Structures are given as structure tokens and as C-alpha cells.
Amino acid sequence: MIVAFESSDPTIVRVDGRTRGALRRELSAARAEHKNLIVDLTDIAELEVRDVAELLACLRIVLGRGGDVRVCGLTPANRLLFEVTRLFQVIDVCASVEEARRAFTLAQNPSPASALASIFDPVEDAAENAA
């Protein structure tokens, strides 16, 4: 259940996949404290549906704060899950932590998720205007 936060920007989240629910708990904690996240899934053999839901919730919250999420270290099973569910279209997937770091530093290489920011903002603006 080891989780490592490297407190650079972006913050790297590593989770030992042997403990059930560890990824969900740690993503929930990371999204509350950090703006840009790299989620290293190297040690997660198979993502659960709840893990994917938490990853998307994390993305939505981080995007709302002007940040972003990148994922790296997909196993073949998790890569297939990303392909079948088309998560590649909303979450930038990198081969390694180093590649994910480079992707954050390249301004001309925005994440696919950055397109979602425009989707989330009008909803929040409409809710504020209605209040």
C-alpha cells in the first residue's frame, strides 16, 4: 500500500497495487492537494471500475483548478481498458514518468483533457449564475 508523492510539479503518485482500493484513496488525497499529477500505474495489474471512476473525478477536479493529469506505466490489461473505454481521448497516457514530465513542460503539447476544461467551465458558470 506504499504511496509515494514526489512533491515536484507535476506531483508523481505511485501506488503499490497489492492493496485493494489504494489507488482510489490516494487519488482522492492527491487531487485535494496538488494541481498537476502524474499517476504511475506500473504496479497496478488491473484497474477496477471504481479506480477508473476516481481517475475521471480526479481529472475533473484538477482541470477545474487549471491543472492536468497524465497516466503512465499501463499494463497490457490496463492499456486494453483505456482503448475499449476510449480513455485515451480524455487522459494523456505516457510510456514513462519521464515522458509524462516532458509532456507537462511542452506547452505546445496539451493533454487531450485540456479540451474538457471548456466543457466543465460552462456547467460551473451556469450553476453560479443560477444561484
Image (cartoon, helix red, strand yellow):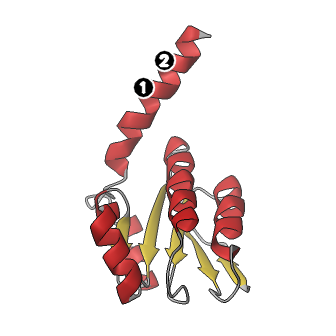
Task: Give the CA separation, mark 2 to mark 1.
Answer: 6 Å
Which amino acid type is shown beneath numbered disc 1?
Pro
Mark 2, other Cα within 10 Å: few <14 / some 14–19 / many ≥20? few
> Which quarter of the figure is the C terminus placed in?
top right
- Residue 86 position by quadrant: bottom left
- Closest to the observer, 66 or 69: 69
Q: Does any portion of residue 94 appear in the rendered image?
A: no
* Residue labelled with disc 1: 122
User: Looking at the picture, does residue 24 appear above or below residue 63?
Assistant: below
> Which quarter of the figure is the N terminus placed in?
bottom right
Residue 76 on image: x %, y %: 35, 88
Q: Residue furthest top?
A: 130
* Residue labelled with disc 2: 126
Residue 37 on image: x %, y %: 54, 65
Q: Does any portion of residue 24 appear in the rendered image?
A: yes
Residue 51 relative to residue 7: left or right: left
User: Looking at the picture, does residue 121 appear above or below residue 24?
Assistant: above
Q: Under tag 2, what secondary structure?
A: helix
Which amino acid type is shown beneath numbered disc 2?
Ala
